[in-house]
Image (tube, rainbow, N blue to C red):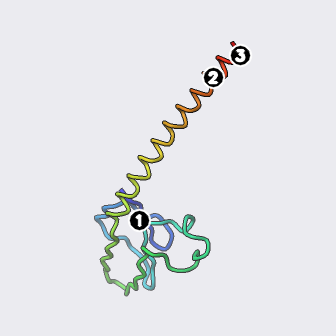
Amino acid sequence: MIPIYVDGVLVGHTPIEKPIPVLQGTHEVSHQPPSIRDPFIQYGKIKDMRQIYVFSGDTVNVFVNTDLLEKSLENVKKEYRNTNYIGIGLSFIFLIQLWLLTG
Protein backbone atom coordinates (compact mmCIF):
# COMPACT_ATOMS: atom_id res chain seq x y z
CA MET A 1 0.00 0.00 0.00
CA ILE A 2 1.59 3.22 -1.22
CA PRO A 3 0.30 6.62 -0.05
CA ILE A 4 -0.98 8.89 -2.82
CA TYR A 5 -0.88 12.69 -2.54
CA VAL A 6 -2.82 15.25 -4.55
CA ASP A 7 -1.43 18.77 -4.25
CA GLY A 8 0.61 17.62 -1.25
CA VAL A 9 -2.40 16.26 0.66
CA LEU A 10 -2.74 12.54 1.44
CA VAL A 11 -5.86 11.25 -0.33
CA GLY A 12 -5.48 7.52 0.23
CA HIS A 13 -3.38 4.44 -0.35
CA THR A 14 -3.10 2.27 -3.43
CA PRO A 15 -5.19 0.90 -4.92
CA ILE A 16 -7.60 3.84 -4.97
CA GLU A 17 -10.89 2.62 -6.35
CA LYS A 18 -13.15 5.68 -6.13
CA PRO A 19 -12.63 9.05 -7.83
CA ILE A 20 -11.09 11.82 -5.73
CA PRO A 21 -13.05 15.07 -6.06
CA VAL A 22 -10.91 18.12 -6.86
CA LEU A 23 -11.61 21.62 -8.09
CA GLN A 24 -11.14 22.62 -11.72
CA GLY A 25 -7.53 23.46 -12.52
CA THR A 26 -4.00 22.10 -12.37
CA HIS A 27 -3.15 19.47 -9.77
CA GLU A 28 -0.05 17.47 -8.85
CA VAL A 29 -0.35 13.74 -8.12
CA SER A 30 2.54 11.86 -6.52
CA HIS A 31 3.47 9.14 -4.05
CA GLN A 32 5.78 11.41 -2.02
CA PRO A 33 4.68 14.04 0.46
CA PRO A 34 6.20 17.48 -0.08
CA SER A 35 8.02 17.27 3.26
CA ILE A 36 10.46 14.56 2.09
CA ARG A 37 11.26 15.96 -1.32
CA ASP A 38 14.74 17.15 -2.10
CA PRO A 39 14.94 20.66 -0.56
CA PHE A 40 16.57 21.98 -3.73
CA ILE A 41 13.52 21.06 -5.79
CA GLN A 42 10.95 21.65 -3.08
CA TYR A 43 8.89 23.97 -5.26
CA GLY A 44 9.60 22.17 -8.49
CA LYS A 45 8.41 18.97 -10.06
CA ILE A 46 9.77 15.68 -8.74
CA LYS A 47 10.56 12.63 -10.85
CA ASP A 48 7.41 10.61 -10.13
CA MET A 49 4.98 13.51 -9.97
CA ARG A 50 2.18 13.81 -12.50
CA GLN A 51 0.79 17.22 -13.26
CA ILE A 52 -2.77 17.13 -14.57
CA TYR A 53 -5.45 19.61 -15.55
CA VAL A 54 -9.04 18.82 -14.58
CA PHE A 55 -11.96 20.49 -16.35
CA SER A 56 -15.18 21.21 -14.48
CA GLY A 57 -17.29 18.03 -14.15
CA ASP A 58 -14.58 15.89 -15.78
CA THR A 59 -12.91 12.72 -14.50
CA VAL A 60 -9.21 12.15 -15.18
CA ASN A 61 -7.52 8.78 -14.71
CA VAL A 62 -3.92 9.04 -13.52
CA PHE A 63 -1.50 6.11 -13.52
CA VAL A 64 1.46 6.32 -11.15
CA ASN A 65 3.74 3.29 -11.39
CA THR A 66 4.27 2.19 -7.80
CA ASP A 67 5.52 -1.36 -8.44
CA LEU A 68 9.20 -0.42 -8.32
CA LEU A 69 8.60 1.84 -5.34
CA GLU A 70 6.83 -0.95 -3.47
CA LYS A 71 9.72 -3.37 -4.12
CA SER A 72 12.26 -0.75 -3.08
CA LEU A 73 10.30 -0.06 0.14
CA GLU A 74 10.32 -3.78 0.94
CA ASN A 75 14.10 -3.86 0.47
CA VAL A 76 14.56 -0.80 2.69
CA LYS A 77 12.43 -2.40 5.42
CA LYS A 78 14.51 -5.60 5.24
CA GLU A 79 17.77 -3.64 5.42
CA TYR A 80 16.46 -1.63 8.36
CA ARG A 81 15.40 -4.79 10.20
CA ASN A 82 18.79 -6.45 9.55
CA THR A 83 20.63 -3.32 10.70
CA ASN A 84 18.61 -3.33 13.92
CA TYR A 85 19.45 -6.99 14.55
CA ILE A 86 23.14 -6.30 13.99
CA GLY A 87 23.02 -3.28 16.31
CA ILE A 88 21.28 -5.24 19.04
CA GLY A 89 23.80 -8.08 18.70
CA LEU A 90 26.77 -5.71 18.90
CA SER A 91 25.26 -3.98 21.93
CA PHE A 92 24.80 -7.36 23.63
CA ILE A 93 28.43 -8.32 22.92
CA PHE A 94 29.59 -4.96 24.28
CA LEU A 95 27.60 -5.45 27.49
CA ILE A 96 29.02 -8.96 27.95
CA GLN A 97 32.57 -7.61 27.53
CA LEU A 98 31.91 -4.87 30.10
CA TRP A 99 30.51 -7.48 32.49
CA LEU A 100 33.57 -9.71 32.02
CA LEU A 101 35.96 -6.78 32.53
CA THR A 102 34.27 -5.65 35.74
CA GLY A 103 33.87 -9.16 37.14
Q: Taking 59 as reference, is 35 above or below it?
A: above
Please report the residue visible at 45 percent of the width from the left and 77 percent of the height from the top: 28
Query: Can you give x and y, in whole percent of width and height, for residue 35 in the image?
Result: 57, 65
Please report the residue visible at 45 percent of the width from the left and 42 percent of the height from the top: 81
Query: Can you give x and y, in whole percent of width and height, for residue 10 in the image?
Result: 46, 64
Amino acid found under the numbered disc labelled 2: Gln
User: Within 10 angstroms of label 2, few (less than 14), some, or many (20 or more) residues?
Assistant: few
3D distance between C-alphas at marks 2 and 3: 9 Å
Left or right of 65, for residue 80 = right
**If the image is split into quadrants, where does the N terminus sit?**
bottom left
Residue identified by numbered label 2: 97
Mark 2 and mark 1 residues within 8 Å of each other at the beta carbon:
no
- Which circle, 3 or 1, is nearer the viewer? 3
Amino acid found under the numbered disc labelled 3: Thr
Q: Residue furthest top?
A: 103
Q: Which residue lies furthest to the front in this view?
A: 101
Which quadrant of the view contains residue 61? Answer: bottom left
Q: Nearer the viewer, residue 87 or 7?
A: 87
Q: Which residue lies furthest to the right in this view?
A: 102
User: Nearer the N terminus, badge 2 or badge 3?
Assistant: 2
**If the image is split into quadrants, where does the C terminus sit?**
top right
Q: Taking 31 as reference, is 88 above or below it?
A: above
Residue identified by numbered label 1: 4
Please report the residue visible at 58 percent of the width from the left and 74 percent of the height from the top: 42
3D distance between C-alphas at marks 2 and 1: 48 Å
User: Nearer the N terminus, badge 2 or badge 1?
Assistant: 1
For residue 102, which numbered disc appears in the image?
3
